[in-house]
């Protein structure tokens, strides 16, 4: 069997070693005679798997006891409503930064529950840069400040953590979680849909400072109430057990690779290689302000759009998959998450060079 290099933005490539381990444990998890998928979530075995995953994530990301770690369901998108329902409290408005399609979705959903103050937007530059924080129109009485550290579709990534003062900082880290070290203590809440850097889709990891628990509006659905989920160790209902287990295997794999600092070094190198190639080859272009180019998602265009189909066909034939850009942006996009090995990026660059030589 041969594994392709899968550049999909999500669900995304997972470490081969993790998939092999899951395969070897599929029918009989460590002598229990059953798959993790078939285990009671209340069993000692599954509770150990769940606790282990949380412990490893805390270690990898440097999460202190001041924070609760929740394994919720409904993907990152369900958090777009869960966050305002839980964090608006007695405040009337929340601050949001608009840097792309995921920011916009979060903003649109929050507007259903309260006033949204868009403190800054880079829409007039087609989301090719991050607005200078000195120009942000933040409010001291905002319930929280929400931003999207990595815009997965646009390929735009912050290289700094905004200073929100005493206002809790909330971040959608779906496509950047565990790709580089982050000071968790600067945040009130971090959430990440799992299918980019953590595991299977549907699972969403939420890291919330404990003083922000217990503020949910009365009408908040029980399943969306952070306090309820925290009080029940993310097992108020049946959690996404298999996804949780798989995320745990990914965390173990990350520790074996040297943890987040080692990943950051590798990710920086992979991204730099690809951007350098794009910048040096006249046939390819990336529209993002170089300071804010994403390490994880690299969109690029061909000098001649009519060759897009041929480019993708040739890539598929070489096992370089899912390079088509998001339908709203067009062009190409290569996602280089933790599990994408450097040889995958090398193979992509070699193909791009060959294609430009022959067809450019
Ligand atoms: C993928 C993604 C989402 C949506 O995740 P779902 O799990 O599909 O809801 C939200 N925000 C960002 C930044 C993403 O990359």
Image (cartoon, rainbow, N blue to C red):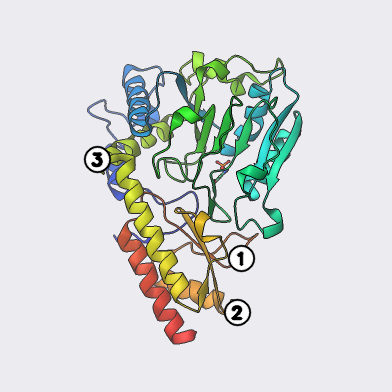
Separation of marks 3 and 2 at Cα, in angstroms: 44 Å
Instruction: Residue 316: name its quadrant.
Output: bottom left
Instruction: Residue 277: name its quadrant.
Output: bottom left
Label 1 CB less than 8 angstroms from ligand 1: no
Which residue was labeled with disc 2? Answer: 306
Q: Position of residue 287 (x, y in %)?
A: 57, 65
Q: Which label sits on residue 330?
A: 1
Tags 3 and 2 in contact by the CB under 8 Å rule?
no
Q: Position of residue 176 (x, y in %)?
A: 47, 44
- Residue 95, relative to residue 45: is it above or below? below
Q: Out of 154 and 125, give the one closest to the viewer.
A: 125
Q: What element carries label 2?
A: helix
Which residue is outermost to the left?
Answer: 31
Viewed as shown, does residue 120 lie left or right of 158? Answer: right
- Residue 272, relative to residue 223: is it above or below? below
Which residue was labeled with disc 3? Answer: 256
Q: Quadrant of ligand 1?
A: top right
Mark sitting earlier along the chain (1/3): 3
Question: What residue appears at the point 50 percent right and 84 percent down from the top-left corner?
Answer: 360
Tags 1 and 3 in contact by the CB under 8 Å rule?
no
Label 3 CB less than 8 angstroms from ligand 1: no
Question: What residue appears at the point 42 percent right and 74 percent down from the top-left corner?
Answer: 352
Q: Where is residue 83 in the image (x, y as percent from the top left)?
A: 63, 28
State whether residue 75 appears in this view: no
Q: Is mark 3 on a helix, strand or loop?
A: helix
């Amino acid at each position: 069997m041969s594994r392709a290099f899968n550049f999909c933005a999500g669900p995304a490539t997972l470490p081969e070693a993790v998939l092999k381990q899951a395969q070897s444990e599929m029918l009989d998890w460590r002598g229990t005679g059953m798959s993790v998928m078939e285990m009671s979530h209340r069993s000692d075995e599954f509770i150990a798997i769940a606790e282990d995953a949380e412990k490893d994530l805390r270690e990898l990301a440097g999460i202190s006891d001041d924070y609760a770690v929740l394994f919720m369901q409904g993907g990152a998108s369900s958090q777009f409503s869960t966050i305002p329902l839980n964090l608006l409290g007695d405040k009337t408005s929340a601050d949001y930064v608009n840097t792309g399609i995921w920011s916009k979705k979060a903003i649109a959903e929050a507007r259903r529950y309260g006033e949204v103050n868009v403190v800054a937007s880079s829409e007039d530059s087609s989301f090719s840069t991050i607005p200078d924080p000195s120009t942000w129109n933040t409010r001291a009485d905002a319930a929280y400040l929400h931003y999207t550290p990595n815009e997965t579709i646009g390929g735009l990534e912050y290289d700094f953590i905004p200073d929100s003062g005493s206002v809790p900082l909330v971040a959608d880290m779906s496509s950047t979680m565990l790709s580089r070290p982050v000071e968790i203590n600067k945040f009130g809440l971090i959430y990440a849909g799992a299918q980019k850097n953590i595991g299977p889709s549907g699972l969403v990891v939420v890291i919330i400072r404990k003083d922000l628990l217990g503020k949910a509006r009365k009408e908040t659905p029980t399943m969306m109430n952070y306090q309820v989920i925290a009080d029940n160790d993310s097992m108020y209902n049946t959690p996404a057990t298999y996804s949780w287990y798989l995320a745990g295997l990914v965390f173990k794999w990350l520790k074996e690779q040297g943890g987040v600092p080692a990943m950051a070094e590798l990710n920086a190198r992979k991204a730099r290689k690809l951007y350098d190639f794009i910048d040096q080859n006249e046939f390819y272009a990336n529209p993002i302000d170089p300071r804010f180019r994403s390490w994880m998602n690299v969109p690029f265009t061909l000098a001649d759009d009519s060759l897009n189909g041929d480019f993708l066909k040739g890539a598929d034939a070489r096992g370089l998959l899912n390079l088509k850009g998001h339908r709203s942006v067009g062009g190409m996009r290569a996602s280089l998450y933790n599990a994408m090995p450097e040889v995958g990026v090398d193979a992509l660059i070699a193909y791009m060079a060959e294609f430009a030589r022959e067809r450019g």
